[in-house]
Image (cartoon, grey):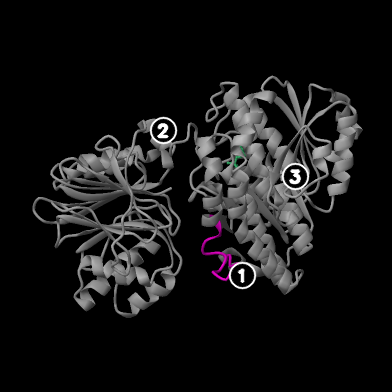
Amino acid sequence: MCGIVGYIGHKKAYPILVKGLQRLEYRGYDSAGVALISDGGHLNVYKAKGKVADLEAYCEDKDTTGCAGIAHTRWATHGEPSSTNAHPHYSASGRLALIHNGIIENYLTLKEKLISFGIPFKSVTDTEVLVQLIEHVMLSNSLTLLEAVQVALHQVIGAYAIAILDREHPDGIVCARQSSPLVVGLGADGDFYLASDASPIAEYTDTVAYLNDGDIAVLQLGQELKVVNIDNEAQHPKVKQIDVTLGQLEKGGYPFFMLKEIFEQPACLRDCMRGRINVDADRITLSAVIDYRECLVSARRIVIVACGTSWHAGLIGKQLIESLCRIPVEVEYASEFRYRDPVIYPDDVVIAISQSGETADTLAAIELARQAGAFVFGVCNAIGASIPRQTQTGVYIHVGPEIGVASTKAFTGQVTVLSMLALCIAHERGTIRDDQYREMVRELTLIPAKMEEALLRNEQIERLAPIFTYARNCLYLGRGYNYPVALEGALKLKEISYIHAEGYPAAEMKHGPIALIDSEMPVFVIATRDHLYDKVISNIQEVRARGGRITAIVTEGDTQIQKFADHIIVLPDTFECFQPLIASIPLQLLAYHIAVCKGKDVDRPRNLAKSVTVE
Ligand code: F6R
């Protein structure tokens, strides 16, 4: 995920900026850059693909003087990772340099307009559009930088945290935020620090102002912090004293990345849907479906290949695609598929799902499918990874780097992309009614808010967790869309708490695992209200009759299940097919809190790697 650092004051800016970028490295990125107004009054921009260390190496023989600068780590969204696409971006005249976190949704429309005025573009990023727009507005109307930013942001749709340097005014930085965080640090000597989170600032000052959405701040040397909105009305962001260690700050105040990533999910899913679902929330546009409509719409069969958590997302994708698009779907472990001599037809669509985009087995499965002439579609998180490069097309999940080894936000991101994909294909194939399509698209946009409600169960789950610490085995049961949720819940527990757990289709339990049930066996049942609800109640009773200890995940308003369960966790209602997005949250939290109670290193579980690049 992109990171921002800025400094203006009496010290040399470059070392502060580089150190700040290093503090943001934990967010993951693919390129870095810095802009400085040198002692000689030049606006110098230096950028490099790769690590901050690569940027430092590049800058070794460059002029890095100056007490004003902005710097950025980029995690590619629009355009591949490269030094050209890295930030900062110069304006056409070279007077301004701008860095940006977020996504400008209407950048193509703005870009076309700017090109028609003869403004050249060097990169394919949405960010360059911003700097060109601001300069164009500034020069053609003789405005100050602040005024130009206000006018330009009136035209912009999307999310941004931006910072801008103006060569003609070397004693100031203008910055703004909308749906992307920005923190200003107030130094004791009148210096200003700026960053996308407080970690690069904390070692210089403990006094910070967190900008609010719509705020535009002017950091002017020798003056108080000035904050206004796009209509130039004064704003008063709260100035706070921060009292946290750097380690905590990098994790956004959470003790582990996994917990941070669980809590990030509502924001991540908004990012995932942004620019794909329109503002009226009634249409999904996936460019991959537009570009390859024929292949997708006329697919005779879809084969999903993936591993681990991504395979669980695939099982949910299967149900979505089969029920909405009426195309048969098979879900394969990539490691089995690649060695099984599978039947692959040239009119098959193979969907490869992978968070890292580097999983060796999934890559091998893709190669096999390509050789057989199938159309291969990728669902990936890591931009520019091998899987997006080796598939004909695909959709990024855009949930930002996942650092905790146990996958959480990538899973819900994958399910969200598969939901959008299924709805798009179904709409194109005419296997869904128009009103039904619109209703489902709208419901999908409500999922982040419902996830926020589900996250309110955190304290309850934290209190429950110690009860399960001594379990040696746990059983997770679910049916229909909730069966993969049970599998994923069990996998999360195994991975980080080292308690053995099995996910099972609830009705299948009586064909074997029921023998394991006794009063020491915790059984987690996902029993949300869907068309199998009554059947699941019967399964709960079967467990109850054998002394099993039941924790049930239920829908709000449920009055039945509490009669049979030891504990219930209540979730907001949604459509059956989107329930996995909500029901996964308490199971992620449960695994997390149980592992913490057991004193495990949640982010780095033993024997596991974040990216499995060996078969
Ligand atoms: C579980 C987990 C793994 C991965 C699997 C595939 O929490 O993270 O099971 O899902 O190794 O990895 P990707 O999705 O990167 O292909």
* Mark 3 neighbour density, 10 Å: few (under 14) some (14–19) many (20 or more): many
Mark 2: secondary structure:
helix
Q: Is 466 placed above or below 109 here?
A: above
* Residue 300 shows in the view: no
Q: Is residue 58 visible?
A: yes
Q: Residue 113 appears at what percent x and percent y?
A: 37, 78
Q: Position of residue 277 (x, y in %)?
A: 57, 65
Query: Disc 2 marks which residue?
Result: 248
> Marks 2 and 3, how far apart in space?
34 Å
Residue positioned 79% across, 39% down in the render: 562
- Depth check: give the residue in front, 310 or 215: 215
> Which mark's residue is nearer the viewer, 2 or 3?
3
Residue at mark 1: 283
Mark 3 lies on residue: 554
Mark 2 beta carbon near ligand 1 (under 8 Å): no
Quadrant position of the C terminus in the picture: top right
Hey, what amino acid is under mark 1? Answer: Arg
Q: What element carries label 1?
A: loop
Q: What residue type is labelled 3?
A: Val
Specify start and end residues of the magenta stretch as a single range.
Answer: 272-286
